[in-house]
Image (cartoon, rainbow, N blue to C red):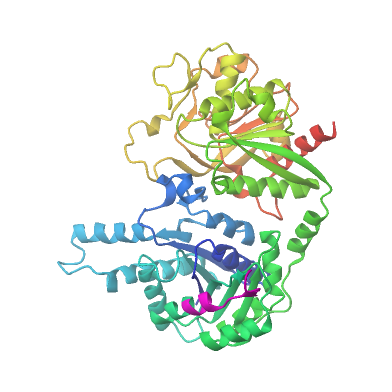
Amino acid sequence: MAKHIFVTGGVVSSLGKGITAASLAHLLKARGYKVTMQKIDPYLNVDPGTMSPYQHGEVFVTDDGYESDLDLGHYERFIDESLTRESNFTQGAIYQSLITKERRGDFLGGTVQVIPHVTNAIKERLYRIADQTQADIVISEIGGTVGDIESQPFIEAARQFKKEKPAGDVVFIHCTLVPYIAAAHEVKTKPTQHSVKELRSVGVQPDFIVCRSDHEISQSVREKIALFCDVTPEDVIACIDAPSIYQVPLALYDQSFDGKVLSRLGLPAYGLPDLAPLRKFLSDQDNCHGEVDIAIVGKYVQLPDAYLSIMEALHHAGVANGVATNLHLIDAEKVSDASAPELLGSMDAVLVPGGFGARAFEGKIAAVRFAREQKIPFFGICLGLQAAVCEFARNVAGLEGATSSEFDEQAAYQVVDIMPDQRNIDEKGGTMRLGAYPCKLRKDTRAFEIYGDEVIYERHRHRFEVSNVYRPRLEEAGLVVSGESPDGRLTEMVELEDHPWFVATQAHPEFKSRPTRPHPLFTSFVAAAKAKRQG
């Protein structure tokens, strides 16, 4: 029977519940336990797939094709496990399933209510992930902030869940803010006290309180929090701002957090956790001597979380190459053939990420052209591949005005077109080509050299593809299709031979990068940037 840990948050959002949960999961896995994670989101969207990146940051995609909250990216990077659609659900999904059942008559005319129907549906998801993964420990992060109206059903469901399970099978961890008031020269515990009071008012007593702060939390502060919140001082855990999120597991380990949680769950703490891979990564990170400047030319640059997995993957690759990656988020709307030298001329590499819609697409094409002509290492991801193909078609293959049918259905040369099985789809949510798909690599290509395998699997999220109508002409002009679907129908990767490093992929390889296992495409890309920097 799986043990369950619930992680809640109070005072403010963006406290780092996800990093705290993922760090604990890393420690428990390092102890030899099978751990899985789950993010519970209170919003009414069925999933984040149709939400603007400005609203929610990036959409993370799982192997089985679920569009999920970006916290799943943190989870996968910290526990080095591929999660599934069971690892994220929203209030919208819960209501959708209940309303579908009600319309079908499954409730036999009964009144459908938050309690017991919504809470039962939530608990069913908690039991389901434990059954499907056969995990020893399930860590569930409840999104939002305690006291929010929308999070109440989830807190209540978790309370009921603990009551249904044997004693010691469920632990609650509450993350709160302990702010430093500069005028008073001290940290204040009152926000934490009120947050815990709010949690206890709905019947949940936290077993541990994780205090987020940018200042040291003294023993006297811990004792004060413990007194007012009905926990022991040892169960008040400090989580101070760290230079790197990957240092958080070690900060928690130094306070024996994993051992305390295992004790509360009635599980043995077998020996010492194997933290050697994480320590090596942190040591390598601290010993990076060089640096590279990499431009990320995108349309959502005002919110860096829109490119979170890409930025993390570049960081992992930088550490693997012994260099710090200075990432420059450049608004693609400001890039043109005229402005590109000023905006990109000092860069060691250029990356064009995915996106949707016509806005800023011409800027991405200008960035591709500058990187191609100036021999700057270039990496295209998803729409970045499509921009690269359109640029090559226009400026090398002679297909003037070549573009995607997504942006201009009347264009003379629609070198990127909608996939046939996407043509008659009206609903936008969860209907793209989603999840892991195979790609067969040509053996005489840079892509094959990087991966070292003929067939690789990457995750996808798109509706449009390179048109096979124009593929022969593009290849005649020198575009190398280095990867395609096993049936040869889809162009998955392209590259150029007469260039230091020019690779684009229709997939999203950033989702599979880990700090201790960086993705080979990103590692090779950063190595090319390093080579350019060194001349």
**In the current view of this chain or complex, which residue is farthest to the left?**
109
**In the current view of this chain or complex, which residue is farthest to the front?**
183
In this rendering, the answer to whether 520 lies above or below 111 is above
Q: Position of residue 80 (x, y in %)?
A: 63, 58
Q: Position of residue 418 (x, y in %)?
A: 42, 28
Query: Quarter of the image holding residue 456?
Result: top right
Of residues 219 and 531, the one drawn nearer to the viewer in this rendering: 219
**Is residue 271 in view?**
yes
Of residues 292 and 88, the one drawn nearer to the viewer in this rendering: 292
Q: Position of residue 500 (x, y in %)?
A: 75, 27
Of residues 227 and 284, the one drawn nearer to the viewer in this rendering: 227
Query: Quarter of the image holding residue 385?
Result: top right
Q: Is residue 427 magenta?
A: no
- The residue sitting at 53% across, 64% down in the picture is 37
Of residues 153 and 477, the one drawn nearer to the viewer in this rendering: 153
Q: Which residues are magenta?
A: 182-194
Quadrant including the C terminus: top right
- The residue sitting at 76% across, 36% down in the picture is 529
In this rendering, the answer to whether 502 lies above or below 256 is above
- The residue sitting at 75% across, 61% down in the picture is 277
**Is residue 203 in view?**
no
In this rendering, the answer to whether 526 lies above or below 260 is above
Q: Position of residue 33 (x, y in %)?
A: 62, 72
- The residue sitting at 56% across, 49% down in the picture is 305
Instruction: Report the number of discs.
Output: 0
Q: Is residue 191 magenta?
A: yes
